[in-house]
Amino acid sequence: MFSRLWYLTVPTASYGRFILSKTTTGVCKDYPSSYGVVWRLYFAIRMQIKECIVSAPGKAILHGEHAVVHGKVALAVSLNLRTYLRLQATSTSKVCINLPNINTFLSWDVAVLKQLLPDFGAELGNVNELDAELVRMLRNFVGVSNGTLDTRSMAILAFLYIYLCVFAKSRELPSLTVSVWSELPTGAGLGSSAAYSVCLAAAMLSASGTIPSPLSDQENTARWGEVEMELINRWAFQGERIIHGNPSGVDNAVGTWGGILRYRSGKITALSRVPMLRILLTNTKVPRSTKVLVAGVKDKMNKFPSIINPVLESVDAVSCTCEQTLTEMASDTPTPEHYNVLEELIDINQHHLNVIGVGHTTLDTLCQVTLARGLHSKLTGAGGGGCGITLLRPETECSVIQNTIQDLRDCGYDCWETRIGAAGVQQHSPLAVKEQVLEVLARY
């Protein structure tokens, strides 16, 4: 629906008449941009959007937390808990963003936002650096100081930055409404900000005609090709830089490509084939500071290098062994022995993480409660609270899963059954979106 571009020709002395004709470029060469009314109509026609719905997965770290900071391998996996975004073209001359998860509902006049348009006219296919001047202008516009890092402010800045940059070359801004709903909790280390940035990038690039819609008439869900996903990933990374400052790029890569990614010393490699594994994802709801926890591990390394360095080497070996096991499972029929290995690796790595000082009593409780049901768990992410994952074997009975979830909720935790290895960013028709999600998105 995004691929049809239209081109307006208006006779010189006839402001009330226009001629509508097709073009492959979407560039109106015969009509000066100063005629704002017709340009707004041009964009409404050009975008051809009744609605564009996209989604992207969250992420968890399977193995390699903290060790990855010191040059070891980490395995990042996509979660089938997703962030959904609905973009609608409007004729209101306003740009609206609705983020009900964080109770944020804002709108701006297009004419006001146009004054912020960057002059650089960046090539969309070569987006590698943040425009510092535009970020500064947006901070002033939104009223965000340099030290402010709250979720609401960062989400607004990322939205405005991607919106303005993607449409910068046209020098005109379309009016639209963007509504976002996420199944991911914020601030839990599950990649919620990256999933948001990936959705923003995919929707804006599609709406601008920079990338085509992957949906055909016969499909309700589809993915873009490699070239388009690379562009989505680059723009999503800029959103992550606005939100986090100096991100690794892992979270947005997982949100874009999904599956399982291997990360080491800045290099990200996707596992070519991955099995879909069921897990329980548990949020202890204990807040933690990643910066403080990372610094604590560094202090331990400096104090006990002959003890901690071998532990990190062992964590690296766990990650590599897990990668090999997952590759075998994807290449052949998974066996009970494969799951035995995965469970042992989970237990070993959890002990590693306690040794380097990033465990927490709530995570110990998670491991004890699930082990009482025959299940194996470990923390995921920074530790010190936060979230943990529990592997579910194919033969695990539904009653065991439900009883375990209830046990964990009785501890005051949030718990979901989900899968890892889920698909990356996708575009959906409304028919492919969960009814409850569509209902939320349709409210705005």
Image: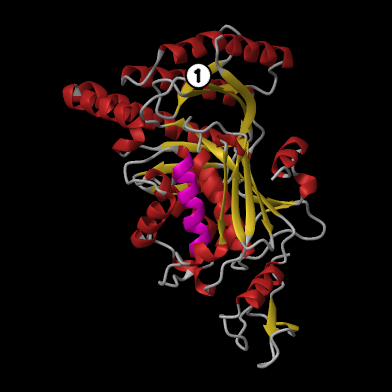
Instruction: From the top left corner, tell me how far across and down residue 278 is, in percent.
Output: 64, 28
Name the residue at the top extreme.
372
Q: Left or right of 214: which side holds 76?
A: left
Residue 4 appears in which quarter of the rendering? bottom right
The residue identified by callout 1 is 284
Q: Amino acid at mark 1?
A: Thr
Instruction: From the top left corner, tell me how far across and down residue 375 is, in percent.
Output: 58, 14
Instruction: From the top left corner, tell me how far across and down residue 254 is, in percent.
Output: 52, 44
**Residue ID at (50%, 44%):** 194
How packed is label 1: few (under 14 Cα within 10 Å), some, or many (20 or more)? many
The kind of secondary structure the magenta stretch mainly shows is helix
Residue 311 shows in the view? yes
Instruction: From the top left corner, tell me how far across and down residue 57 is, in percent.
Output: 59, 41
From which residue to which does the magenta span run?
152-164
**Residue ID at (68%, 81%):** 7
**Magenta span contains residue 102:** no
Position above or below: 298 against 206: above
As rendered, which of 29 and 129 lies closer to the eye?
29
Quadrant into which the C terminus falls: top right
Q: Identify the element where label 1 is drawn.
A: loop
As rendered, which of 234 and 153 lies closer to the eye?
153
